[in-house]
Image (cartoon, rainbow, N blue to C red):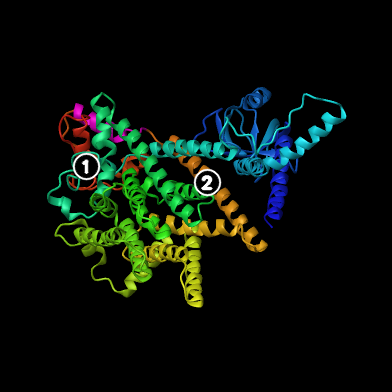
Amino acid sequence: MKNKINKILLIISSVLVVSILFLAILGSIERIGYLSEFKLDKSLSKKNAYFYNFRIKYYSKIFRNSDIYGVYFNVPKTININNNKMSLKNIKMDKKGSPYGTFISSKELKYDDKVENIKYKLKIKLVLLILFLLSLIYIISAHGNYILSVLDKYMNKLSNKYAINTYKSYNIMEYKVFGKYRLTSILFFIYLILLAIFVYSFLYSCDIRRDDWQFTSTYAYYNIFDFIGKFWQRGRHISDMLLSISMRPFGRIFVSLGADPFTTQKISIAFFETIYFYILSAIVSYYIFIINNKKEYKLIFLMISLFTLNFLILEKNSPALSSNAYYSLYIGSAGISLVIWLPIFYFFIYEKEILILNNKIHNYILFTFLIYFATFVHEATSLFIAGISFFAFIFFIIRKKYNIGVLYSTFLFMIYTVISFLLTAIPAGSRGKDYIERKIYGSNIIDIFENMYIYFDTYNNMFDNIIFICSIVILVLFIIKFIKNSKIDKYDYFISSILLVSILGIIGFYSIKIRTIWFEKVMLFSVVSLLLIKNINSKSLTLSLISLFCTLFLIFLMSFSALVKHNDYYQSYFITKRSDKFLIEKFVEADKLGKKEIILTPEDYKKDRILRNQGILSSNPNGFPNRSISKWMQQYGYTKNYIELIYTNK
């Protein structure tokens, strides 16, 4: 059955590669078209300099701009050919491959006039190029042995027929790239490098905003590294430390050597967030890899990393686009927490205890400290860790397969999480208590369901909802299986625990108006990915083909989505931004003039994207994030004195 599937995929991939290559060759042939559909922009036009929007039109009914092709024409040739007639200049296309553009003409034109002799070529669109590359990679990596064996036999026949003795037979099974690495490993390594560049470049281009100013200066909600006072009024202070370490202390080392603080902060934050991205993607993939009997790690990592890339970095509601600091708080703590929980998972699967230190007592003391790092984090992360710890604890007790150390660690995960919740929610003046009083206290059951509906509608896209519904269906099927068989497989039990904790976490946090549940979404997707990959080798041909199609479709969809989002963001970033240091320039100018305050208005927001991304500033100079920005400017030497920042609607 596996051979049948491979042959089907080989045929499909080969047809795609040949078809796309054929279309690319046909599109590269130069053809003649014309410009028309002229629309005069009166606001930009002057006498003898008429500004027109236009569209390129075609004589061919087949070779034109479409879902397959983008159109490109030679601008200098167009200007030279038509200069004697109307003096065209400043021809610009709306974007690469678009049939729409603008130019300035010395002559007035009607809507249906024509500018003839436009030579154009067609290029296949990015989506087809990606499909071509993926198909080619699949053919080489999955069927390279078969292709070379056919060539090998053919060359041997030729050498025997014509008595050629110089031919040497090669077998890709025996041949390894660079002496010891297989081709799939090389491709995977290239993917890791390209992914790192992709992630880092995007994170670096994100604006510094809101909490980024606060947690990288000495002024914050509390002084994070002083273990007194408000430190114990916030049960997520490990996450808060992750927000700060990019500049405190690492970035400051470079600042002390003369580096620009703002640029250093952007570089440092992007560097640490890229590391957090890899930690989370790698550790989630490793958990799924273990559950999948240590098979297909590369494929699992590919799917998890693409999902994390799309929905934790590039999605419009993602932590990376809300604030760089948020990404450290939510994603960094999630990855680190899963790493620390790994010994419990390992014992759950293999019934073997992992000891970092030889002495068991010392090892338990170490884990007492490490578990603190895994639980005093963002509530959505600690709740998930506590939830799977609870189910693991129940499993150990029922099966009576545990040792004291593992049971102690599992119990400690739950206790620490409760303490962290209490520290956040109970003390007077704590952020959690304030949140409860403002948004949750007095809510009734109708309010809770209304909150859930609003948050699902606002912060879940269609893909999120599909994964959520699939997860519920999978959980129900597992429960039916448990009831029917009257026994529980440990792998199924663990998968069900992940599903149940994640589903309840999303529902629970949405019901109290908290949207930061990206970690739960990652875990739901990881389970769906696991089941798809497992079923590729199903005995049922139908199920196998469906799983294979869904897996390949998801990889293609997420790859394409990531490229489009990244490209769109970069285009808007470079087109709309005026200065990456808009606020810094404002403060430096005010400091030179000896001003004690800076007043910003809605007009300033309209002019500058960087300022808009800060959100609405407070009218109170001591409000958030105004005071944080002012303190940051003074601390890093952009201003000698403290300058207040005020926003007014007047």
Q: Is residue 320 above or below residue 539?
A: above
Of badges 2 and 1, the one in the foreground is 2
- Crowding at label 2, few (<14), some or many (≥20) Cα neighbours within 10 Å? some
Which residue is rendered at x = 28% and y = 44% of the image?
Answer: 243
Residue 298, which numbered label? 2
Q: Main secondary structure of the magenta part?
A: helix
What span is in magenta? 579-592
Local SS, label 2 = helix
- Residue 464: % across, % down: 47, 58
Q: Nearer the viewer, residue 578 or 233?
A: 233
- Tag 2: residue type? Lys
Q: Mark 2 or 1 closer to N-term?
A: 2
Q: Nearer the viewer, residue 74 or 50?
A: 74
What is the spatial separation of the Cα atoms under label 2 and label 1, in whole angstroms? 43 Å
Residue 481, which numbered label? none
Which residue is rendered at x = 65% and y = 58% of the image?
Answer: 545
- Kindly tell me whether residue 95 is visible in this rendering: no
Q: Residue furthest front?
A: 359
- Residue 230: % across, % down: 15, 51
Q: Is residue 267 above or below residue 219?
A: above
Which residue is rendered at x = 47% and y = 67% of the image?
Answer: 489
Residue 628, which numbered label? 1
Please give left or right for residue 528 compared with residue 279 in the image. right
Please give left or right for residue 81 compared with residue 235 in the image. right
Which residue is rendered at x = 64% and y = 36% of the image?
Answer: 174
- Crowding at label 1, few (<14), some or many (≥20) Cα neighbours within 10 Å? many
Q: Residue furthest left?
A: 229
Q: Is residue 544 above or below residue 52?
A: below
**Cβ–Cβ below 8 Å for labels 2 and 1?**
no
- Residue 467: % across, % down: 49, 61
Query: Is residue 222 on the magenta stretch?
Result: no
- Residue 235: % across, % down: 22, 55
